Amino acid sequence: MVDTRGVKLPDYEKLFDNGKKFLVSVIPEAKASGDITGSDLYAAFPPKLVFERYAAAQEDERIADVVCGCFSAIGRATAKTLGSAVATQLLEAAVAAQELGKDAIYRYITAQELVRIFEPDKLWGLLEDKKWDEKDTPEHRTLVRACLTAFKEFELGGGPTRTLHAIEDAIGIEAYVEYLPKEVLVEIIRTARGVNDGKGAPDASPLPQGVAFSVDVMALVASTDVLSEHLPIPLLMRPIRAAAQTFGFVKKPEPPAEPASPPASTTLAPTGDPDDDEKVPTTPPPAKKPDGDSDEPIVEIGKGDGAASDPDEDDAALEDLLRGQAEKDKEKKPDGDGPLELDEDDVRTTVGAVPVSPPSGGGKSPPPLPSQRGGQTTGRRSR
């Protein structure tokens, strides 16, 4: 508590949970060790921010407490009328003129007030950023002793016995054996044996009965003071940091970002630009069916590609075919001077190996056969 000229600040600490009570106990020790300075507090929690929070909560009395504490010439009635903006300007001007030290301001903006109006992670982060536990000096031994003592006092492990277990489990029995002096280990065993024999501790303090070697027995000798004196500071901070996570002194890390979805296909659709180097092949459209109801393909005589047929060209092709056939027949009959006899079956009205059936019913008739005289083929077409 800070008594500002007879005005006692209210005891908000009784409204705190055990985690905040721990911070209220530790911050003054951190200031005493030099790990948190007035300049650190002035940068992290400047008077402007403090007074704005007081004003938002309609706590002008708290602004007056700080102003009256820093400036003895200002009466309380006057200080209560200043408001947050004027009070801020007053303190900042005094600091700039070096008429007011930053440490002096935080003798009146107490650790209790900082814990009350600011988030715990901001205060704890200020201490952790200093990495003070990497140093091993008498001042830092004092600070870690304060941390362990407050941890045990406010039962940050969740009850007296569970708190002792939390310390022992976090540090590890192996560390006790490695770092504690031999005489301490002997005393731990002797104390445990005294419990087994139903005797009291050497100092006649009451001991738990009927338990061979409980955590309570260990803590009677391996107290927070003994641990703070002999064990490495980083080991001693293990239970403290576990409690910091539990009580929200440390912000939880952000969840990892979800992996990005696989990239979309890089195949480009045709743009229709004639200058494109790459063309995406397209399926040709199906051929149109010919007019009519029939699905049968129409074959034109004399054309192998399905084009329209010219009757004169068909007649000429047929005449050439028959002339060639007549020549072959003459070669087979070297003595034949008479006309070539052709049966009706010998005449094949084919062009391109496509048989042509005689029309049935209606439809266009095929071109006429060459002129025949008396059943004899002359090989020429009559005109």
Image (tube, rainbow, N blue to C red):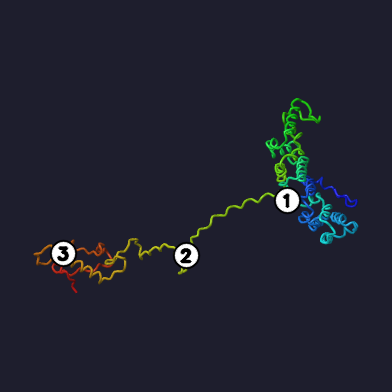
Report the amino acid beneath label 1. Lys
Which residue is depicted at the point 45% across and 66% down? Answer: 277
The residue pinned by badge 3 equals 328
Tell me which numbered mark, 1 or 2, is placed earlier along the sequence: 1
- CA distance separating discs 1 and 2: 62 Å
Q: Quadrant of residue 216?
A: top right
Q: Is residue 32 visible?
A: yes
Tell me which numbered mark, 2 or 3, is placed earlier along the sequence: 2
Q: Position of residue 171 (x, y in %)?
A: 70, 39
The residue pinned by badge 2 equals 270
Up/down of 159 relative to 382, above or below: above
Between label 1 and label 3, give the one nearer the viewer.
1
Q: Position of residue 58 (x, y in %)?
A: 83, 56
Q: Position of residue 91 (x, y in %)?
A: 83, 59
Other-residue count near label 2 (Cα within 10 Å), few / some / many at <14 / 14–19 / ≥20: few
Report the amino acid beneath label 2. Pro
Report the amino acid beneath label 3. Lys
Which residue is depicted at the point 88% across and 52% down? Answer: 4
Which residue is depicted at the point 20% across and 68% down? Answer: 320
Q: Position of residue 332 (x, y in %)?
A: 13, 62
Q: Is residue 177 rendered to the left or right of residue 375?
A: right
